[in-house]
Image (spheres, helix red, strand yellow):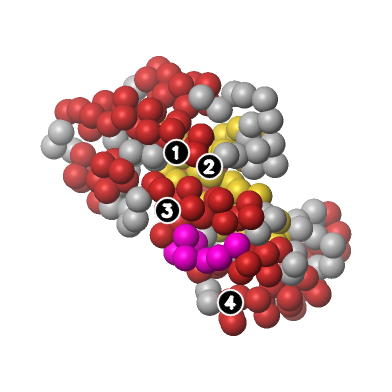
Amino acid sequence: VAALRSYFGRALTLRRSVFLGDANALCLAPARLLPLLELVAEAFPGLPLFSFVDAWTGRRRTAGEWNACRSRGLRRVYLGLETGDPRLLSWLGKPGAPHDAVRLVHALHEGGLDAGVIVLVGAGGERFSASHIARTAEILDLMALGPRDVVYLSEHVDDPDSAYGRRAAGAADLAPLPPERVRQQHDAIAGALHRPAGPRLARYDLREFVY
C-alpha cells in the first residue's frame, strides 16, 4: 500500500475502485485473505474492491465466507468460465467442470456479491464451435445472472508457440476461426443472454493488454 501511494501520488484520487491482484488472489485461505481485505479497506475507504478466482478453487468457498469478504469491501468476483462445453474445457487443459462455475456464482450471489464471467470466443476451432455455443449458453443460463453481473466475451488469441497452438497445429478443424465465424459465435452467445433483467455484456480483448 505504501508503494502504491508513493507511485501514484495525487493521481490516486482519480481512482474509483481497487483490484486485488494477482491472477487468483481470492484462492487464499480466509485466515490470510480477510486481514488483507481489511487492510485495503482501511487504506482506500469507500472504494469498491474487485478480484479474480478460478472456478475450481472458488467452488469450495461457502456463501458465508463470500459474505465475510463482502463486509470488507469486495463487490464483484471475476471467474474464467471459458466454455460451458466440458470436452472443450478438458481440451484446453482446464481443471474441473463448467458446473463448478455455476456453483461458484450461486454462492457469490447468496453471499451478496456480483459476478464477472469470462467466456473465450473462438476457442476450439470448428471442431467444438457448435457445442461451445450451445453448452456455454446453457451454463450461463443456469447461473441466473442478473443486471449487476457482467459477461465478458473474450476472443481467443492464437499463439502458435503456446501449448494450445502446438496441439492444434496438426488438426485442420482446430485452426483459428476466420473473423466472420468468430463474430457469429460471439453473436450467438450474446443473443442467448439478451433478456429482461439479464447480465451486462462487455468485450475483453487480451491484445489490448500486451505492451
Q: Which residues are magenta?
A: 57-63
- Height in image: 140 above or below 31? above
Is 17 displayed left or right of 178 in the figure?
right
N-terminal of the pair, mark 2 or mark 4, is 4
Q: Is residue 175 visible?
A: no
N-terminal of the pair, mark 2 or mark 3, is 3
N-terminal of the pair, mark 1 or mark 4, is 4
Q: Is residue 110 visible?
A: yes
Q: Which residue is mark 2?
A: 143
What is the spatial separation of the Cα atoms under label 2 and label 1, in whole angstroms? 6 Å
What is the spatial separation of the Cα atoms under label 1 and label 3, in whole angstroms? 10 Å
Q: Position of residue 194 (x, y in %)?
A: 59, 23
Q: Secondary structure at mark 3?
A: helix
For image coordinates 63% across by 35% down, the residue present is 199
- Find out whether the residues at labels 1 and 3 contact each other: C-beta distance under 8 Å: no
Check disc 4: other Cα within 10 Å, few if <14, some if 14-19, many if 20+: some
- Height in image: 61 above or below 113? below
What is the spatial separation of the Cα atoms under label 4 and label 3, in whole angstroms? 20 Å
**Amino acid type, residue under disc 2 in the picture:** Met
Q: Which residue is mark 1?
A: 139
**Amino acid type, residue under disc 4 in the picture:** Pro
Q: Which residue is mark 3?
A: 100
Q: Position of residue 68 (x, y in %)?
A: 68, 69
Q: Which residue is mark 4?
A: 30
**Amino acid type, residue under disc 1 in the picture:** Ile
What is the spatial separation of the Cα atoms under label 2 and label 4, in whole angstroms? 24 Å
The image quadrant that residue 18 belongs to is bottom right
- Which of the labelled discs sits on residue 91, or is there none? none
Quarter of the picture holding the N terminus: bottom right
- Residue 121 colored magenta? no
